[in-house]
Amino acid sequence: MKIRILAITVLLVFVSAATFADLQIGAVAMYKGDPSTVSVSGLSLQDFTFGLDTRLNLGILQGSVSALYYPADVTSTDPIPASLVALMDVGLCLDVLFFRLGAGIGPNFSIPLESSTPARDALPVGVNLKLAGDVMLGKFSVGLVFVYYVNSFEDFAAPNFFQLARPIIGVSALYKLF
């Protein structure tokens, strides 16, 4: 009986949220290098990471999850295994005409895809600040995404925040489901 009540409650919350919410899902491509050194002539597919992007907007509140695939990097002195990086954030968004501007903060998780990685390194957690600007074209949107990685929330208050943060920039293409 309790499970039925819980299921009905979850269903009612989902239906009512779907009435007022926008759920978008799509693809994102992020440049892995330092944005200040971007040279269009020297770019290749290996300079980018690709993944999925999902955003749920409820009024001015926005929640977002991005999952990016990072292939293994065996060329560095400290080999990095292939991994998925999940960026989660909650923040605010503002729709102005056909533009949507958003900012959010949340944790990021790195999930190694190779079993040889020690268990202690399985889920390193950091924090990200995500800024997004989209052009809404009906059910489709195309936009720019800026993400700043830091190690902890205290780094946001540091006077040298922009030296501590690792910025990445990318583009997203989303489709509005409801």
Image: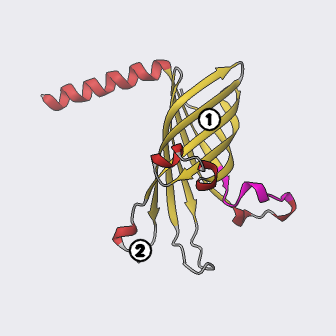
Q: Secondary structure at mark 1?
A: strand
Query: Which of 32 and 58 lies nearest the eye of the viewer?
Result: 32
- Residue 126 within the segment the image draws in magenta: no
- Residue 141, picture quadrant: top right
Judging from the image, what secondary structure is the residue with disc 2 in? loop
Q: Residue furthest front?
A: 159
Q: Which residues are magenta?
A: 29-40
For the image shown, how many numbered marks are present on the structure? 2
Q: State the residue at coordinates (59%, 81%).
A: 77
Residue 117's disc number: 2
Rendered position, 112 above or below 170:
below
Callout 2 amino acid: Thr
Q: Tag 2: Cα neighbours inside 10 Å, few (<14), some, or many (≥20)?
A: few
Report whether 149 appears left or right of 115: right
- Counting from the top left corner in percent of width and height, residue 119 is at 34, 70
Q: Earlier in the sequence, mark 1 or mark 2?
A: 2
Give the residue at the far right of this rendering.
41
For the view shown, which residue lies furthest in the left direction? 1
Residue in the image at 67% along x and 32% along y: 140
Residue 175 - label: 1
Q: Nearer the viewer, residue 2 or 98?
A: 98
Q: Residue at x 87, y 62 (%)?
A: 41
User: Is label 1 or label 2 in front?
Assistant: 2
Q: CA distance from mark 1 to mark 2?
A: 36 Å
Of residue 29 and residue 61, the one placed in the foreground of this image is 61
Q: Which residue is rendered at x = 60% and y = 31% of the image?
A: 102
The N terminus appears in which quarter of the rendering? top left
- Looking at the picture, does residue 67 appear above or below residue 143? below
- Give the number of the disc on residue 73: none
Q: What's under tag 1, amino acid-wise?
A: Tyr
